[in-house]
Amino acid sequence: MAHRNQGPPMTGCYDADHHAVDREDQLPGYMDPAFREKGWRIVETEAGRKALAIGDFVSQLSFELQPVPGSFRENILRLRSGEDLDPFQGARGPVLPEFVDRDQRLAFMDQQGIEGILLFPGAPLESHWMAEAGDPAQLYANLRAVNRMSAEHWGWRYRDRIHSAALLSLEDVGLALEELDRVMAEGCKVVNLVPGPVRGRSPADPCFDRFWARINESRLLVSLHTAPASHRAYREMLDGYWEPIDPPGVERGLCDTTSAFMGFQMFNERPIMDTVAALILHNLFGRFPELRVISVENGAFWVAYAVKLMNKNYAINQKGFWLGGKPERPSAVFRKHVCVTPFHEDDVQELVDVVGAESVTFGSDFPHAEGLASPVSDFLGDLEVEDQAAVEKIMRTNLKGLLDRVGS
C-alpha cells in the first residue's frame, strides 16, 4: 500500500483513542459498599490467580503482562490486503509506566507529537457487564466506581491535555442525569455510551430527551466507543435466528461470537452503523442541534454504505413514520453532527470523499496491540490523504474544536 505522508513529523496532534491500563485491583475500592457483592471485586480463579470480576464475569486480563502496543499492526495490514490469517496474534510484554501513569503518558505524548487525547478505561470497556439487564441501581454503582477511578487517577481534563471519558448508560434516565451532573461538576468534557439499542429502544427515542437536553445545553462531546456490551446486546436480539444459539462443541470466541456469520451480525460495524442511523433518522440532532457525536474504534468502511442507504430510504419513505420527527437529508446531518475515527488500515481518503475531512478524526488505540506503537508517525505512514489541509483537520483541528466548544 502507499505511504504518502513521510515528511517532517507533525506536532500538536489530537488523538481520539487512547486507553488507560488501570491497575484492575484498584476498582473494587471505588464501589459503594451496598453494591460490592455483585460489583467490581477481586476473586481467585481455579488456577489460583487473582482476577477482576463483576457480576458473573471474570476478566482474563493479566495484572502483570499486556500485549505489546502495535504488535498486531502488520497482521491487520496483511488481512486488509486479502491474506487469510488471524490478525490477533502478537507479543506480550510488561506494563510500562506510560500505560498507567498520567505524567508518564504526557511525557510519551510529548515524544510522539500529541497535544491532546481522549482517554478511555481499560478493563471496564473489555467485558459485557454494561449489557446485563435487570438492576439499574447496580449498573450505576458499577459505572460510578469506574468514573471515580478515572477522575482520581487520570483526571477529567488533566492539564487540559488528557480528556478522560466518563462511562454512562441510558438504562435509567434519572440515574443517568445524576451521574452526568456529578461528572460535569468535576470538569468532565466527554461522556461515552455503548453503541446499540437500549432495551429495545432507539437511543434517539424521545423518552431519553431529558438526558440529551442536558448534553445539548452543555455541549459535551458524546463518544460511542466499541464495547463487548454492544456485541452481547446484538447476540441477545439474534440468538436462535439464522444459526443455533450455542452449537455443540463450539466455544464462544472473540466478542462472544460462535461463527463467522455471527461475527458478521454482531461485531463492531453493525452496532455503530445502526446506532448512527438511529440518531440521524430518529431526528435526535434536529431536536438537539448542539449535539456532537464521535465514533471511536469502530472503523470507517461502514460509513459510505450507511450514508448512501440512509439517503435512499429517506427519499423513498417520505410519507412514513418518523420517530422523533423528520430530519434533514441524512448525509448533511452526518457531516454536521458525527465524527468518525477510522482504523489505521481503513481507506481514509474514501471516508473524506463521503463525509468531508471535517468529519474525520485521528485515533491510534494506544497502547492496544491492534493499535499503533508510534501513534502519529504510524498513522501518517498508512494515511493515503494527500491534501495537507485535510490532514491537518484529521490530525488536529477537528477533535480540538470538539473539545474547545464544550461549555462555550
Image (cartoon, rainbow, N blue to C red):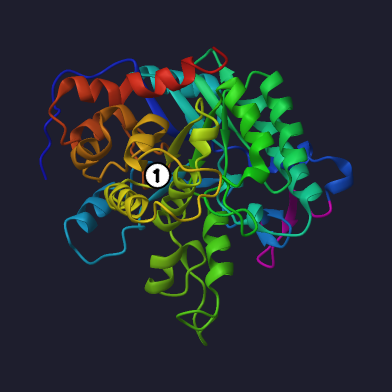
**Magenta highlight range:** 37-49
Toward the bottom, the furthest residue is: 248
Q: Please determine whether, in this image, residue 186 is positioned above or below residue 323.
A: above
* Residue 97 drawn at (x, y percent): 51, 29
Residue under the image location 44 percent in, 35 percent down: 294
**Which quadrant is the C terminus positioned in?**
top right
Q: Please determine whether, in this image, residue 377 is positioned above or below residue 230.
A: above
Q: Please determine whether, in this image, residue 278 is positioned above or below residue 177.
A: below
Most frequent secondary structure within the magenta stretch: loop
Instruction: Provide the secondary structure element on which disc 1 rests.
Output: loop
Dot 1 alpha-carbon crowd within 10 angstroms: few under 14, some 14 to 19, many 20 or more: many
Q: In this view, does 131 lie to the left or right of 306?
A: right
Residue under the image location 74 percent in, 51 percent down: 42
Asked whether residue 156 appears in the rendered view, the answer is no
* Residue 173 drawn at (x, y percent): 72, 41
Q: Is residue 321 left or right of residue 368?
A: right
Where is residue 32, by image quadrant?
top right
* Residue 139 drawn at (x, y percent): 74, 48
**Which quadrant is the N terminus positioned in?**
top left
Give the total of numbered labels.
1
Residue under the image location 40 percent in, 47 percent down: 298
The residue where tag 1 is placed is 68
Residue under the image location 41 percent in, 18 percent down: 401
